[in-house]
Amino acid sequence: MVTEYARERLLQAAGFLPRHLKMTIGGLPEALQGEIEEIRLRAGRPMTVVVPDREIPTGSIVTVDDLELTIEIASQASAYAVLNQVKNGFVTIRGGHRLGICGTGVIKNGELFNLRQVSSLALRVARELPGAAVPLLPELQEAGGLQSTLILSPPGRGKTTLLRDLIRCISDGQGIQASRVGVADERGELAAMFGGLPQMKIGARTDIVDGCPKAATMLMLLRGMNPQVLAVDEITAPEDVEAMEIAAGCGVTLLATAHAGSLEDLCRRPIYRRLVAENIFRRIILIELSDGQRRYQVSRWGEDPCTGGSVRP
């Protein structure tokens, strides 16, 4: 069933597009609007929309001017500030939506410094799914306590959305004892802070640091805010793992996400191997896609599943 909320979020994201492209999105069938996860703009090609199992052309041809105007609207006429953030691959814009940017790189001191001649954009629609985490909570607890949990899936399956709702439930005490939650929101996607206020429902007992490297932020929250639960989206660097080891040693429960299609996939990636070996997480949530619908599989993992330890539903 198409929800009015899903359409509202899509149309809010489409509000960053030039008028003719925005009107194209608004004219799509309502059933399709409720499924759209991304809007793709590629210079010289038709605008497309991404749904869970395919990418659909809309017929509206995108120009370079359309790309530049989209960045100008999304950045509130501060395109230079936005382009200076693209070394992360994307920027988070008002409402929590995400704008991925491709073009010709400007290299400084051997690193990507900026982009010029933008060639394509990916506008990911940020949506909340209040209540999505509630059915999982009994499986994430043991002896009345929340267990450290790692959420796995390939890109685009909803890891961030599920993590956000877990944070909300824990912070508000919905289906679980309420706890203080510290959020290291480096990319600004979990809380979507704007003017000091979260644009997403993130819970009443949640403290957020956004726009800062995850590892430093986790340690900052540990020292200054005394969280009972620490949440971080997308473990990507060895220093993230080190910070999580420190937090686990302090008795803090951890929530995190990682790009992997299975536990076997996770074990093959060196950056995650240490996390697994240290036995930091006690629960795994694997997000799978079946007939266009997301399904959540919760497992308990043993001492070191990458070397034959147990993982069981």
Image: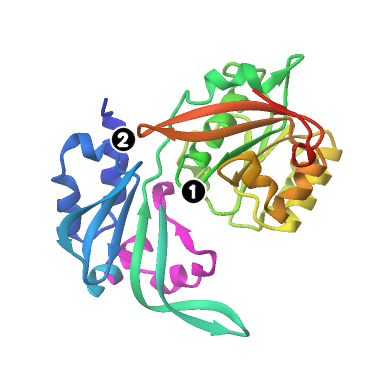
Instruction: Give the position of the C terminus as an image quadrant.
Output: top right
Its colouring scheme is rainbow
Give the residue number, with chain letter if any, for mark 2.
6
Residue drawn at 49 percent across, 48 percent down: 155
In the image, farthest residue toward the front = 308
Q: Residues within 10 Å of mark 2 (few under 14, many from 20)?
A: many
Residue 13, image x, y percentages: 31, 49
Residue 134 appears left or right of 230: left
Residue 51, image x, y percentages: 31, 43
- Give the main secondary structure of the magenta stretch: helix
In the image, farthest residue toward the right = 249
Q: Are marks 2 and 1 in contact (CB under 8 Å)?
A: no
Q: Which residues are magenta?
A: 68-97
Q: Secondary structure at mark 1?
A: loop
Instruction: Give the position of the N terminus as an image quadrant.
Output: top left
Give the residue number, with chain letter if any, for mark 1.
155
Residue drawn at 52 percent across, 40 percent down: 159
Query: In the figure, residue 83 lies in which quadrant?
Result: bottom left
Image disc number at residue 242: none
Magenta residue check for 6: no
Residue 20, image x, y percentages: 14, 59
Q: Amino acid at mark 2?
A: Ala
- Choose the circle earlier in sequence order: 2 or 1: 2
Q: In the rendered view, would you say 157 is above or below 172?
A: below
Magenta residue check for 69: yes
Residue drawn at 63 percent across, 30 percent down: 205
Residue 233 appears left or right of 194: right
Residue 7, image x, y percentages: 26, 37
Residue drawn at 58 percent across, 56 percent down: 211
Query: In the figure, residue 123 lies in which quadrant?
Result: bottom left
